[in-house]
Amino acid sequence: MKFLNEEVAKQLEGIFKGMKDDVTVALFTKDQDCETCTDTKDFISELASVAPKLSLENHDLEKDSEKAQEFGVKMAPSLVLLDKDKNYKRIKFNGVPSGHEINSFISSVMEVSGNSQELPKEIMERIEKIDKPVNIKVFVTLACPHCPGAVEKAHKLALENPNIHADMIEAQTFFDMSEEYNVSSVPKIVINDEFEFVGNQPLEVFLDEIEKTQVA
């Protein structure tokens, strides 16, 4: 299955030319019970073909269990972004980041490559004060136009503070997990499996909920 037509491929080629440093996509798939694994691999391969500084590293979730554990990968398909020194940047895409989520994927790739967007001073001061572990789950669907913004915010927080890990979770691919977290509308954001809200809210709302987890 081909995901990118010639026009879109050309547009993406122009965007990816702006990458500062190399980025590696570590993709975890499995052979059984994974309908979207092949699609995800094909999609990322197409993106890498128009981005000279983007490379794909394939892993089997079960055979490469140590590597999966290193990156906190428990589902397939799942992909993590590694910087030019192969450092894990604490952001994950669980499910194929196609549809509207191509926007959050591109944004994350650009950030990891060194094209970082500067945040306001008062926001950075709040982010820097986070000193306890934080996990952010962002449930999305590929048809949701508001979801990429929420994913981008969660991933930006993780990139700015080593105590924060952020996961995009495609709700239909991981339906059982969506039911577990009572996902009825997207984007749904769940922080430390305790605090939650819905919608592409401002970064301040993310921080308001995160700061609740920092109280002793």
Image (tube, rainbow, N blue to C red):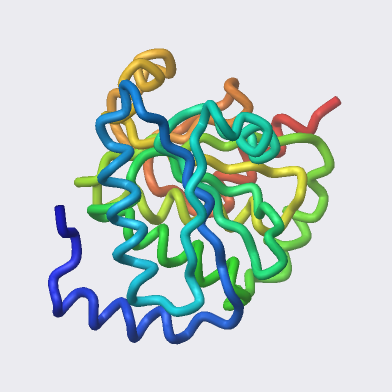
Residue 14 on image: x %, y %: 34, 86
Q: In screen coordinates, is 129 left or right of 73?
A: right
Q: Nearer the viewer, residue 59 or 175?
A: 59
Above or below 93: residue 48:
below
Q: In screen coordinates, is 99 left or right of 44?
A: left
Residue 84 falls in image quadrant = bottom right
Q: Nearer the viewer, residue 184 or 9?
A: 9
Query: Can residue 141 be seen in the rendering of this structure?
Result: yes
Above or below 64: residue 119:
below
Identified at 28% across, 24% down, the residue is 184
Residue 4 on image: x %, y %: 19, 66
Q: Nearer the viewer, residue 198 or 138?
A: 138
Q: In screen coordinates, is 99 left or right of 203?
A: left
Farthest residue to the front: give it.
63
Identified at 40% across, 76% down, the residue is 51
Q: Nearer the viewer, residue 209 or 20?
A: 20
Quarter containing the C terminus: top right
Query: Can residue 198 be seen in the rendering of this structure?
Result: no
Identified at 53% across, 51% down, the residue is 26
